[in-house]
Amino acid sequence: MPRLARTLGALVLLAGAAACVPAEAGEAIPAGRSDHTIVVGGQTRTFHLYRPDSLPAAAPLVVMLHGGFGSGAQAEQDYGWDTMADTGRFVVAYPDGFGRAWNAGAGCCGRPGTQDVDDVAFIAAVVTRIRRDLPVDPSRVYAAGMSNGAMLAYRLACDTDLFAAIAPVAGTLLGPCPRPRPVSLLHIHGTADRRVPYDGSRGSGHVAIDGPPVPDLITRWRTAGSCGAATVRTEGPSTISTATCANGRAIELITVAGAGHQWPGGAGDRVLLDKPSDAFDATATIWSFFATHPRAA
């Protein structure tokens, strides 16, 4: 079982984020960016949304989970999801971690981990609120995450039935998950990641995590999902291993040779991240995976 020693550092809050339009519960959510608050477990939590100018009658929803020391605004600025949402006509939610971190299990990470903040309940409440106020298709709700946010994405797939697919980047699973939910999974990882090492060794720097080797983690999810044998192909420094599972689901692992703790195609190194790989655009790749993997009927 994975064990955590301390906290996770992944991203840094950016100053000067674009202004948002406040929106309260029950009000129409405007096109563009809007700020929102919600009370969960007696705590007032924050998130903001990006809504394209037009949405289909049943729109997909992507929940983007920032890394440790990050924020929803930082994730929005760094990863290009708003532009992708305009093209794909889906809604993006950017929740803010408590103290810029997430409780991802096994004591990780930061204040949420030490204070046992229920971030699974927070994200579930965010999804419920958005589904109430916007025409979201419940079969096309997805979660992507970077580092500590990737760890929370795994927790959401372990502990809720809300998501059709998850896409963890540079993260791992912490804590028990005896019965993973039947979701599609796309995991992206650099083989030279020192903060959340690909081989499961202890992380360095701001990270002190003992997680499973990524190949072992993916094998566990494939086994739980009754998946077939994986097919493997290479594209430059990337190796893509894909297994088809029951009911149209898939488990896919993309490794980037020599890449560190980063979001491929992202905006760049802020303080704590490695230089993003230019092997591919992780956001475009994740959306393509999400778009073709709704929840099975």
Image (tube, rainbow, N blue to C red):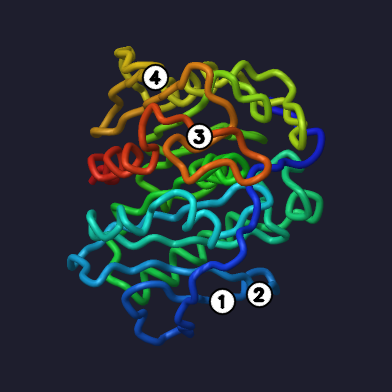
Residue nearer the viewer, 249 or 150:
150
Position of the N terminus, as image quadrant, is top right
Quadrant location of residue 14?
A: bottom right
Q: CA distance from mark 1 to mark 2?
A: 7 Å
Amino acid at dot 4: Ser
x and y, in percent, of residue 35 in the image: 50, 76
Residue corresponding to mark 4:
238
Which element type, helix, strand or loop, lies under badge 1?
strand
Of labels 3 and 2, earlier in sequence is 2
Q: Which residue is denoted by mark 2 in the rendering? A: 44
Which one is earlier in the sequence, the residue at label 1 or at label 2? 1
Report the mark closest to the observer, 3 or 2. 3
Q: Pick out the residue farthest to the left.
A: 57
* Residue at 36% over, 18% down: 241
Instruction: Name the N-terminal-most of marks 4 and 2.
Output: 2
User: Is the C-beta separation of discs 1 and 2 under 8 Å?
Assistant: yes
The residue lying toward the viewer, choosing from 170 and 224, is 170
Report if the CB atoms under discs 4 and 1 are less than 8 Å apart: no
Q: CA distance from mark 4 to mark 1?
A: 39 Å
Q: Secondary structure at mark 3?
A: loop
| Residue assigned mark 3 | 276
Q: Nearer the viewer, mark 4 or mark 1?
A: 4
Residue 12 x %, y %: 65, 52
Question: Where does residue 86 sit, x and y in percent of width and height?
Answer: 26, 60
135, 20: nearer the viewer: 20
Left or right, 237 with respect to 290, comes to: right
Q: Earlier in the sequence, mark 4 or mark 1?
A: 1
Query: How far is the residue under mark 1 from the one under mark 3?
Result: 32 Å
Q: Secondary structure at mark 4?
A: strand
Label 2 crowding class (10 Å Cα cut-off): few <14, some 14-19, many 20+?
few
**Image quadrant in which you'd find residue 90:** bottom left
Give whichever of discs 3 and 4 has the lower sequence position.
4
